[in-house]
Image (spheres, coloured by chain):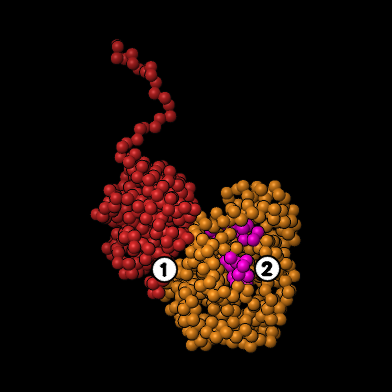
Chain colours: A orange, B red
Amino acid sequence: MSFAALLENWDFDDVTLQINACTEADVRRALSKSKRDLQDFMALISPAGDAFLEEMAQQSYRLTRQRFGNTLQFYIPLYLSNLCANDCTYCGFSMSNKLKRKTLSLDEIEAECLAIKAMGFDSLLLVTGEHETKVGMDYFRQALPIIKRHFSYLTMEVQPLAEAEYRELCQLGLDAVLVYQETYRRRTYAKHHLKGKKMDFDWRLDTPERLGRAGIDKMGLGVLIGLDDWRTDSFFAALHLKYLQKTYWRSRYSLSFPRLRPCSGGLVDKTQMSDRQLVQLICAYRLLDGEVELSLSTRESAQFRDKLFPIGITSLSAGSSTQPGGYAQANQALEQFEIDDSRAPQDVAVAVQNAGMQPVWKDWEKGYSKIL
Amino acid sequence: MLTIANTQFSSRLITGTGKFASGQSMQAALSASGTELVTLALKRLDLVQNKDDILAPLQELGVRLLPNTSGAKTAEEAVFAARLAREALGTNWLKLEIHPDQRYLLPDPIETLKAAEQLVKEGFIVLPYCGADPVLCMRLQEVGCAAVMPLGAPIGSNRGLLSKDFLDIIVEQSQVSVIVDAGIGAPSHAAQAMEMGVDAVLVNTAIAVSPNPVAMGRAFKQAVSAGRTAFEAGLGSVQKNAEASSPLTGFLEHL
């Protein structure tokens, strides 16, 4: 059964009611178990879970250290293009947004790679808007071999592609793909994705399965927190994770929890999530799954990130620029969203060390990539 | 003395290098553990920029390096990584690790056997991480592995010798060194393994993640040594029942 078919069995509002009905006894039961299921996850993210936040954090800390040790993986995004053929209510790259558009040439990509490499990174996240004709497979076929020369591990966050296309990109050095569903409620999804191929909820929802069949090393899931009820949407992200882990067991998984940030022409977060609630969600994900990677971007403030490092996070970006060409030459008018933690990577590394952990810049060998 | 491929080690504690809070912390803990054979993941080494916190501290310690293929999901990937490790680190010793299962990191027996056979032919001294499967261990021995490294429990789980009964069979049958790899979470687990007669144990998480890695390294050193001494001294047999002081068949002697 596909995940789309599985999702048909669930009603978003029912799940919201179930989560909100969880009691302190449910949370206590979940905390006392050594293996937790999705029912336990509901209790842990519920309003009743708030009273147990410290205990959740302590358990999350222990589980994370046991699996990942006293280390944190570092990565950095490289924005290749801000061209986009979609209109999404929350994103600065939306096509109707008056924004100077830019797609990096191959020479500019090389310059960006050198600038990033000089910062010490070996794990790179490639980001584009979603523009299939101008920034599609033809562009990726040219760009990836250039980039892979410089970096061991390549992750992509671009428009969803077909299975055969993912297979081809893996052979050019692609290792991981992030594809966030944004929200698992169709109605809300339709409200925020107004034009372009991203309107197709099912094509996006099916992407991780195409990635699994293509043999990708890692895939990243997540919802954009602020579009709908964060608890319910996060429950569906967890349901999606559990489905994929059983089906595509050779792949690794990561979860992200981006909260809406101000962007040029964008909407304001209507479904607020407090810092405390974000901590609750991170701990709940960890308590549900000791192995999943939890990734934290520079959307969050430096001060907050420093406190989150030990709790459950396993990888983080640092020194990020969300504009194409931003490492070799900065230009704020091109950016996707405002970043909050603007410290240099080495300063973040020091903060990580001060928290008693070792920054890991390289954790992959190119020979493990599926390069032909 | 522990002997692997005609090389002798006075310590029977093999250690890992992952999960430490810093290179210094790793160096101090490994030094306290007395280890002489240390495994390190090729994927963590930055051989281009020479910017890693692992290799230099190990070279300072003067331990023998045992590069591993952690991250490989197939025999082909592991063989590739092994060749790279040999070239980069100048050693033909290799800890073969192939675990496509991403949750419990359990080793793939089919790919492991295939890679071991190839690597032995290429002149590697192969120490394969494998399930506690006595038949698989015999097969690995047959293709020329210098030791076998069956798991006690899943990597990093600290759950001890869950596979004890099968480890017993492996120790009984094996003609190469048996090293219990993975799952050893406390010095008492290590001592228990050594008392069973395994030749060595490999410990990483329990030392690296301890609040005091140096003290924990020392504790493992003592436990491994105590367990080995007990094995060599010979443990008393364990019985469920008391030995009867009035035997039922004593009368036969008077007939």
Nearest to the observer: residue A195 or residue B104: B104
Q: Specify the segment rendered in magenta.
A: A279-306
Left or right? Give the position of A257 relative to A145. right
CB within 8 Å, label 2 to label 1: no
Q: Residue at x 41, y 71 (%)?
A: B51
Identify which residue is drawn at 58% across, 59% down: A311
Residue A280 image point, x, y percent: 65, 59
Local SS, label 2: loop
Q: Is residue A237 above or below residue A189?
A: above
Q: Chain of mark 2?
A: A
* Magenta-drawn stretch contains A291: yes
Q: Secondary structure at mark 1?
A: loop
Local packing at callout 2 (Cα closer than 10 Å; few below 14, some 14-19, many 20+) is: many
Residue A361 visible, this orientation: yes
Residue B79 vs B189, above or below: the answer is below
Q: Judge left or right: residue A269 versus residue B95.
A: right
Residue B58: within the magenta? no
Residue that mark 2 sits on: A225
Disc number placed over residue B156 in the picture, else none:
none
| Label 2 to label 1: alpha-carbon separation | 36 Å
Write the residue at 30% across / 11% down: B255
Q: Quadrant of residue B82?
A: bottom left
Tell me, yes or no, whether dots 2 and 1 are on the same chain.
no
Q: Is residue A75 visible?
A: no
The residue sitting at 56% across, 76% down in the picture is: A320
When the figure is inspected, residue B180 is found, relative to residue A4, above or below; the finding is: above
Q: Where does the image place residue A104, in percent across and percent down from the top left?
A: 54, 86
| Residue position for label 1 | B52
Q: Amino acid at mark 1?
A: Asp
Report x, y in % for residue B190: 40, 46
Viewer-nearest of discs 2 and 1 = 1
